[in-house]
């Protein structure tokens, strides 16, 4: 029984981490129909920016508890700077082109960003582990979990609920839903679609960067940390259905549970357990679990 | 009109003799001044650059600079190698095995020989290419025992010992320091390195402690970085000893995530590649953790003049101490120098050719910052060294190592012609 409880706790922690990243990816796709291969690089940028900012903060003796705020601030800054830059500077010229072209463009962007990170921060690892252990540990099912994970889960829930509330209950959110539904008609109705695209991309980038920033205290920040994350985020988003918020949440939960169960009961299959689930979902629901019914356009 | 003292004919002769004189003057010196170009292939980008590739490159630069100056390296006073000064040409090992074989074929057009390869996959692919192209190639770091177990080479040498010794020595160390060990667990990256490391360790433990139980074996993806669930599984497994061959960012993430959760207190954790992370992460690695440095390197290196010089030269230039990849690169260069110098003196003090260097290199024994190295296996092409493990103990702010045990080469390496797997299973028979 305690083993099962620890499987669930591990799953929830892992799912929260995945959800923050997948949320940004699915948001960008849902609104702009761009599969952002560079999402992992924004994650890495968030981690590096957090490492630099928090490293500076702690190095100068400022209150360690405020370092959590610094993590989020670093991520927001990354989003605010790189989001509009990339969207206005590069992607804007690609709208309306074939989806494959957009995929190649974002992949090229990923490669450029990976090397830029190495130029700016070098190849040596960065450590900012103090925030991770600062709040102590709590015991669940006989095992210790750092309290830091509660923050991770809280941010994840906040992000999901926040985006959902904005989409459903605010005016800009409802306009965005219109843009998601039909870009041309929205433009015809006078909605500034370009601005919505820029804001959405910025928010998506910020979410990826928050994922990276919150991960930074738990790992050594090294080049290439964004690569594995893209693959996982894709799996989550594909399972849940591209463009669906609830899909990303459910996909993250499923992936987290499957992986956690594999690690505890059958570690040898852990590597491909997620992809087996993805394959099964795609066999029965090719567009994902929460794929919207598509209207055929003539 | 007065005739010019130097008529046009005389002038023409003088003009044509002058360059010939110049050439003659430099001809003697020129033959010895042609530098020895060494291609160095190591990770300069990607996850393996920070912990391995860059320290190796930096060590290469330090050693070559000192060798070219002459009289700086203890025990290796003569300038350069075999009389020639050394020039290093660096190539990035990143990009995968197929790319590396292509890069190798391109590189040997520009250099006299190659030292390189951290990745076992790259070693296994490049060795046959080296043999085919008949170019002296020294593998300096990769661990797979299969290079000289599966084939014989004339042109390929490996100046570093294999990974078998890491894990056999780990098993020996654990059975000596934790004699009551009943349950072991493992967490290793799910690819050849991790798989081989665990299987060698497990096989050795089964021989040393028959009836040993395996509590759980975790196989996270390489470069995963998130080990929450794995750590929970290890914690609830009740293992006495946890074995891990994690390296680089994965190892550091594992330490950062497992330490606050008490894994290191509950079990004795063995990090066979732990040494590279100790400088930045030492304060996070709790007492009782068993650390390996892939050989008698770094904190486990013997206190010789050569080691002291190497550490000081490296630290003065780069501000950080050298780690095991640095030691292994220095070892490759000094081994090569020993071979070159030996070949030169047998060649009437003239720069030796490749075949003479190869003949001198086989079965050579030389001193390196990590101690004595013997090219004793693989028909004289594969080095053997002792293996050292120690346990972390914090002394205030300082990280020290207690219970440091050194295992001589014949205890941790299979004899010539015997495969590592078979040797372990036979109970480490020295088989003559």
Image (tube, grey):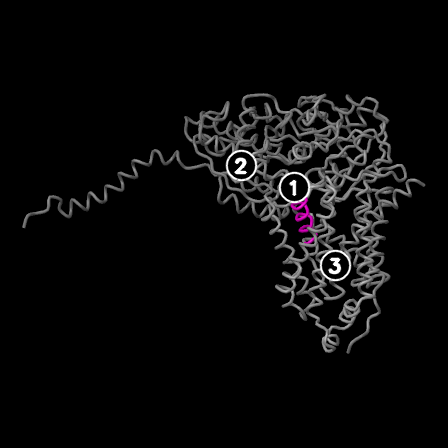
According to the picture, the residue beneath numbered tag 3 turns out to be A25
Picture disc at residue B136: 2
What range is drawn magenta here?
Answer: A42-59
Instruction: Tell me where residue B18 sits by quadrant.
Output: top left
Query: Where in the figure is residue A200, as x and y percent of width and height?
Result: 72, 63
Magenta-drawn stretch, dominant element (helix, strand or loop):
helix
Q: Is residue A54 magenta?
A: yes
Give the quarter of the figure containing the C terminus of chain B.
Answer: top right
Instruction: Tell me where residue B130 sits by quadrant.
Output: top right
Would you say B126 lies left or right of A217 here?
A: left
Query: Where in the figure is residue B370, as x and y percent of width and height?
Result: 60, 26
Q: Are marks 3 and 2 in contact (CB under 8 Å)?
A: no
Task: Let me know if residue B423 appears in the view.
Answer: no
Q: Earlier in the sequence, mark 1 or mark 3?
A: 3
According to the picture, the residue beneath numbered tag 1 turns out to be A125
Query: Where in the figure is residue B428, as x and y percent of width and height?
Result: 74, 24
Q: Observer-nearest residue: A115 or B345?
A: A115
**Badge 1, how many Cα within 10 Å: few under 14, some, many 20+?**
many
Picture disc at residue A215: none
**What is the residue that sits farthest to the left in this orientation?**
B1
Q: Observer-nearest residue: A79 or A98?
A: A79
């Amino acid at each position: 029984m305690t083993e099962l409880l620890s499987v669930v706790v591990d799953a929830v922690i892992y799912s929260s981490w995945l959800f923050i990243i997948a949320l940004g990816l699915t948001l960008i796709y849902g609104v702009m129909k761009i599969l952002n291969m560079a999402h992992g690089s924004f994650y890495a940028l968030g981690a590096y920016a957090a490492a630099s900012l928090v490293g500076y903060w702690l190095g100068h003796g400022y209150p360690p508890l405020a370092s959590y705020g610094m993590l989020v601030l670093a991520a927001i800054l990354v989003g605010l700077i790189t989001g509009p830059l990339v969207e206005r500077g590069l992607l804007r010229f690609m709208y309306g082109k074939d989806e494959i072209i957009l995929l190649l463009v974002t992949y090229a962007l990923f490669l450029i960003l990976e090397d830029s990170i190495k130029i700016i921060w070098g190849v040596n690892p960065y450590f900012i582990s103090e925030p991770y252990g600062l709040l102590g540990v709590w015991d669940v099912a006989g095992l210790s979990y750092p309290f830091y994970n509660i923050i991770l889960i809280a941010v994840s829930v906040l992000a999901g609920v926040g985006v959902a509330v904005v989409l459903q209950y605010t005016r800009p959110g409802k306009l965005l839903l219109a843009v998601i539904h039909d870009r041309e008609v929205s433009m015809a109705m006078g909605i500034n679609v370009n601005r919505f695209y820029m804001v959405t991309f910025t928010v998506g980038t910020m979410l990826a960067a928050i994922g990276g920033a919150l991960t930074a205290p738990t790992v050594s920040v090294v080049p290439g940390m964004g690569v594995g994350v893209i693959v996982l985020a894709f799996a989550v988003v594909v399972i849940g259905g591209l463009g669906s918020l609830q899909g990303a949440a459910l996909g993250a939960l499923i992936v987290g549970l499957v992986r956690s169960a594999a690690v505890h009961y059958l570690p040898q299959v852990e590597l491909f357990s997620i992809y087996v689930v993805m394959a099964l979902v795609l066999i029965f629901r090719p567009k994902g679990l929460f794929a919207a019914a598509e209207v055929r356009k003539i | 009109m007065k005739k010019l003292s130097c008529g046009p004919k005389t002038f023409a002769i003088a003009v044509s003799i002058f360059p010939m004189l110049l050439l003659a003057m430099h001809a003697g010196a020129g033959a010895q001044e042609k530098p020895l170009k060494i291609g160095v292939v190591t990770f300069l980008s990607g996850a393996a650059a920070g912990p391995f590739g860059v320290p190796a490159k930096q060590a290469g630069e330090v050693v070559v600079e000192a060798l070219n100056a002459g009289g700086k390296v203890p025990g290796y006073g003569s300038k350069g190698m075999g009389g020639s000064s050394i020039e290093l040409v660096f190539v990035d090992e990143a990009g995968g095995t197929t790319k590396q074989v292509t890069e190798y074929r391109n590189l040997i057009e520009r250099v006299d020989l190659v030292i390189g390869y951290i990745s076992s996959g790259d070693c296994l692919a490049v060795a046959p290419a080296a043999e085919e192209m008949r170019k002296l190639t020294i593998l300096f770091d990769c661990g797979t025992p299969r290079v000289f177990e599966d084939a014989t080479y004339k042109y390929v040498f490996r100046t570093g010992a294999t990974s078998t010794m890491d894990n056999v020595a780990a098993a020996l160390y654990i059975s000596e320091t934790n004699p009551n060990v009943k349950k072991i667990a493992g967490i290793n990256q799910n690819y050849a390195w991790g798989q081989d490391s665990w299987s060698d360790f497990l096989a050795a433990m089964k021989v040393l402690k028959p009836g040993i139980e395996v509590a759980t074996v975790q196989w996270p993806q390489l470069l995963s970085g998130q080990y929450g669930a794995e750590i929970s599984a290890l914690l609830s497994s009740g293992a006495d000893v946890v074995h891990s061959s994690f390296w680089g960012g994965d190892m550091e993430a594992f330490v950062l995530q497992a330490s606050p959760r008490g894994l290191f207190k509950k079990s004795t954790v063995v990090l066979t590649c732990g040494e590279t992370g100790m400088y930045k992460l030492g304060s996070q690695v709790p007492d009782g953790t068993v650390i390996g440095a892939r050989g008698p390197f770094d904190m486990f290196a013997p206190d010789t003049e050569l080691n002291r010089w190497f550490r000081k030269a490296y630290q003065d230039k780069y501000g950080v101490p050298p780690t095991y990849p640095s030691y292994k690169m220095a070892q490759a260069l000094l081994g090569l120098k020993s071979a070159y110098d030996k070949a030169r003196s047998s060649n009437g003090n003239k720069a030796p050719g490749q075949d003479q260097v190869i003949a001198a290199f086989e079965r050579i024994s030389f001193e390196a910052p990590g101690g004595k190295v013997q090219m004793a296996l693989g028909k004289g092409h594969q080095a053997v060294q002792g293996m050292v493990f120690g346990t972390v103990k914090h002394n205030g702010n300082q990280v020290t190592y207690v219970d440091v045990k050194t295992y001589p080469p014949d205890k941790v390496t299979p004899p010539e012609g015997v495969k590592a797997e078979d040797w372990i299973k036979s109970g480490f028979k020295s088989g003559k």
